Image (tube, helix red, strand yellow):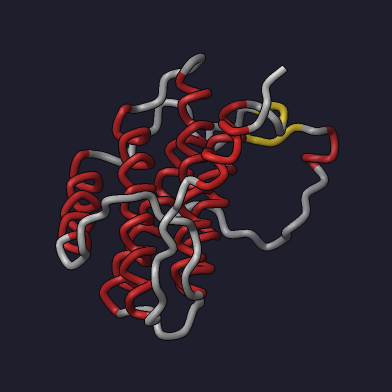
Amino acid sequence: MGHRLSKIYTRTGDDGTTALGDGTRVRKDHPRVEAFGTVDEANSAIGTVLAVAGLPDPVRECLTRVQHDLFDLGAELCIPGHRVIGPAQIERLESDLDAFNATLPPLKEFILPGGGPAASACHLARTVCRRAERRAWSLAATETVAAEALIYLNRLSDLLFVLARVAARAEKGGESLWRGTSADAAKDQPRD
């Protein structure tokens, strides 16, 4: 196990820099820090989902495994050259995704984010996960990022979408379908 934190503040980041896992100091807005920081946000958003009472046990078990994966993924992104996420984690996500999706009616239209507390929290976690994926791709534009890390984030956002649908049903909530009224109204507006 790594270092234990006995003191939370160190004052070393007061100059706008932070240490990567290999000891290198970079600016706090460095693409690598943005990437692993947003993965941490996604993990926290999933923690919010897990805090909702009445979440189905299979969803809770799945998301708890995902939180461990995201901690590993954050460490991978924090240490240049470090690899933790591999095909096994991606295959597990795909298997979970297929199993949960098999219980749902097919989608014929877009749905609006919402539903009960767990479904809404899943949708929010999904959007944070998409942002984490974008930040990881931004990092990949200038530094090496393992393909599995990028794929994992992509699959996870898909899984969170499906879990939002599962949670909506468990909460006896419905799904609001997008009617496209905003788009229809926009096309009827005069253009300059």
Q: Where's residue 89, x and y in %?
A: 24, 48
Q: Is residue 104 left or right of residue 116?
A: left
Which quadrant holds residue 15? top right
**42 relative to 6, above or below:** above
- 177, 55: nearer the viewer: 177
Q: Where's residue 148, x and y in %?
A: 29, 34
Q: Residue at x 49, y 56 (%)?
A: 125
Q: Residue at x 40, y 66 (%)?
A: 175
Quadrant of image for the N terminus:
bottom left
Q: Residue furthest top?
A: 142
Quadrant of image for the C terminus:
top right
Q: Residue at x 33, y 50 (%)?
A: 109
- 36, 97: nearer the viewer: 97
Which quadrant holds residue 33? top right
Q: Is residue 109 left or right of residue 80?
A: left
Q: Residue at x 67, y 63 (%)?
A: 6
Q: Where's residue 191, x and y in %?
A: 67, 21
Q: Where's residue 40, x and y in %?
A: 54, 50
Q: Is residue 26 left or right of residue 140?
A: right
Marker count (numbered): 0
Q: Residue furthest bottom?
A: 54
**51 relative to 162, above or below:** below
Q: Is residue 183 left or right of residue 10?
A: left
- 174, 49: nearer the viewer: 174
